[in-house]
Amino acid sequence: MVTIKDVEHIAKLARIRINENNKAEFVEQFNKVLTYIEKLNEVDTTNVPETTSGYLYSKIMREDKVHEGLKRQDLEQLTEHFNCDGFFTVPKII
């Protein structure tokens, strides 16, 4: 069970300030999360394979295809910030 002292310690580790009025609310929220996790620990996962994500990456992967990129002449026409050496010029930021 999380206490106000635990919330203060977590806030210190996270380097955040928590208003005194909100500490009790955070205690309640942390304890709700921990109660939910305890419920999840009761679920039988004997035949469930371990995963690193709940998302099936194999369904979103696509084959890499080579496409022709933009030509330098086309790029030069897109901007007025192209110098004679073939580089883009940008404003100095300091």
Image: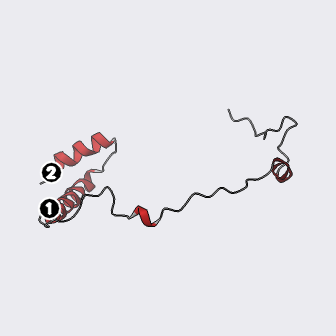
**Horizontally, is 46 left or right of 94 in the view?**
left
Which quadrant holds the C terminus? top right
Q: Which residue is mark 1?
A: 41
Residue 10: image quadrant is top left
Query: Residue 14, position in %: x, y?
Result: 32, 43
Q: Which residue type does callout 1 highlight?
A: Asn
**Horizontally, is 55 left or right of 41 in the view?**
right
Q: Which residue type does callout 2 highlight?
A: Thr
Question: In this orientation, which residue lies closer to the viewer: 3 or 38?
Answer: 38
Question: In this orientation, which residue lies closer to the viewer: 35 or 59?
Answer: 59
Q: Residue at x 37, y 64 (%)?
A: 55
Give the SS element for disc 1: helix
Residue 37: image quadrant is bottom left
Give the SS element for disc 2: loop
Q: Residue at x 21, y 64 (%)?
A: 48
Query: Residue 52, position in %: x, y?
Result: 31, 55
Graded by Cα atoms within 10 Å as few (under 14), some (14 to 19) or many (20 or more), the crowding at tag 1 reads: few
Q: Which residue is mark 2?
A: 3
Question: In this orientation, which residue lies closer to the viewer: 6 or 50?
Answer: 50
**What is the distance, in whole Å, between disc 1 and disc 2 at their CAs?**
22 Å
In the rendered image, the vertical position of residue 54 relative to residue 10, given as above or below? below
Question: In this orientation, which residue lies closer to the viewer: 83 or 52?
Answer: 52
Graded by Cα atoms within 10 Å as few (under 14), some (14 to 19) or many (20 or more), the crowding at tag 2 reads: some
